[in-house]
Amino acid sequence: MRSVVARISLLAVILACCLSSFCQKGFDFNDRCKQAYQEIIQLKLHSAKRLLDQEKAAHPDNLIPYLLDNYIDFFTLLFNEDPQELKEKKGAMDKRLSLINEGPSSSPFYLFSKSVINFQWAAVRMKFGYNWDGGWLFRRSYLLIKDNQEKFPGFSPNLLYNGSMKIAADAIPDGYRWLSNLLGVKGSAAKGFEDIESFLSEKDEWAVLFKDEALFYYLFLRYYNKNERKEVLEYIRANKPDVRNNHLFTFLAVNLNVNDQQSENAIRIIREMTSSSDYLQTPVWDLQMGYALMNRLDEQTPVYFERYLSRFKGSFYVKDVLQKLSWFYYIKGDQQKAEEYRKRLISSGAQRTDADKQAQKEALSGTWPNKLLLETRLLNDGGYFQEALHLLAGKRAVDFTDASDKLEFYYRVARLYDETGRQDESITFYEQAIKAGENRKEYYAARSALQLGIIYEEKQEAAQAAYWYRKCLSMKGHDYKNSLDQRAKAGLSRVQ
């Protein structure tokens, strides 16, 4: 009898060991996971979720689906900024990290997955205004990827995230420098770009898989951090990433075109993009279309901005959009509606972006911009340079009685000359804007110094460029301080 019991006990132990071995969790980036990841990078989040659910049912011990679940939350929360959705996702990061902890540390995906999850939640927390929490998550991600690179130097995706974080850390505005110093995070844009470029040149399995994600970060950072605007847009035109079906690339192309004064291109790209329920549904497209149409003073502008405000649950650019709507009706001569939107602006949204801060400041001032200069600004922002120059034809600074309007006139003329190839004349007007406004709160003088830095950098006159970038950084208390300082700091880093 004892022999039978002993045999049964031994069999149970062997079976338990076998089951334990059989149920070992692991990182299997199989074909279905690769397909789901590629769908995610196109922002086809709903079809990706179906694939991940199938994978979890078929292989419950595969941990890659939980990493990819985090990608879905990352893009959804970053684009839609819904506080209720953030509340519903509370605890998701810790649950996923706990699952990853059950995986084998011998896999390069063990620390990599942890780093990516922390990095994505750092971005989300900062987007929602939790900068302190986001900073600590960023630091944790930064240390994890460094550790993974030491343990698995041949694992190419390390280069992508390590490089991106080096660039992000280097570009932190002075207004938040205390946070990076406290966290002990130091960046280097030059080394960061070197890492990403090295990754893009790799040909291994993972470099091929993560290429589109890397390209998105690389082009976005090159445009905003290195100020290689023409080069990035030329790259997009020459290499033709799929801006119709890959909505991440659609967003990249639209955003860069709007910010590069190419509203017509932005409008065309949005109108030609593929529409399907598989994609992330986001009001971002209404926001971008509204900006592009506003820049040509289009009658359809309010339709898109109002739809954005009704669908968007967050606070980013809400004040800015309401300011644009108030401007629209102000230009059209409907002062009552203009005042209504301004009143709504004061009590709506938040002041976490420079654009929103400036909108709030203008609304509280009780004053309205010079209508002629405002129309000139919008046309210039959209790339309608000749139309803007036509508005200012025959005008001089003495034609404006207000000191702020004189300053803006110098700046607007400088920008239009700069955009139309009349560089020597633009330099003269930029210098006049700086002289008139370096001790004022408007951003025109600081932006003029930034533009002079860019001009001299393009001329390869590094000393002059550095002088003007420093000049921009030295101006205090003006509108758009953080964003202009960030660009000036990046420029100074390049020329040095």
Image: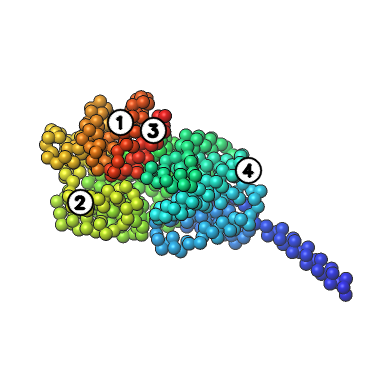
Q: Position of residue 375 (x, y in %)?
A: 20, 43
Q: Earlier in the sequence, mark 2 or mark 1?
A: 2
The answer to whether 232 appears left or right of 298 in the picture is right
Tag 4, which secondary structure? Answer: helix
Tag 3, which secondary structure? Answer: helix
Q: Nearer the viewer, mark 4 or mark 3?
A: 3
Dots 4, 1 in contact, CB < 8 A: no
Q: Earlier in the sequence, mark 4 or mark 3?
A: 4
Tag 1, which secondary structure? Answer: helix
Tag 2, which secondary structure? Answer: helix
For residue 405, what is the image quadrant?
top left
Q: Residue at x 38, y 42 (%)?
A: 174
Q: Earlier in the sequence, mark 4 or mark 2?
A: 4
Q: Residue at x 32, y 43 (%)?
A: 481
**Residue denoted by label 4:** 151
**Residue denoted by label 2:** 365
- Residue 187 seen: yes
**Residue denoted by label 3:** 492
Q: CA distance from mark 4 to mark 3?
A: 34 Å
Q: CA distance from mark 2 to mark 1?
A: 30 Å
Q: Amino acid at mark 2?
A: Ser
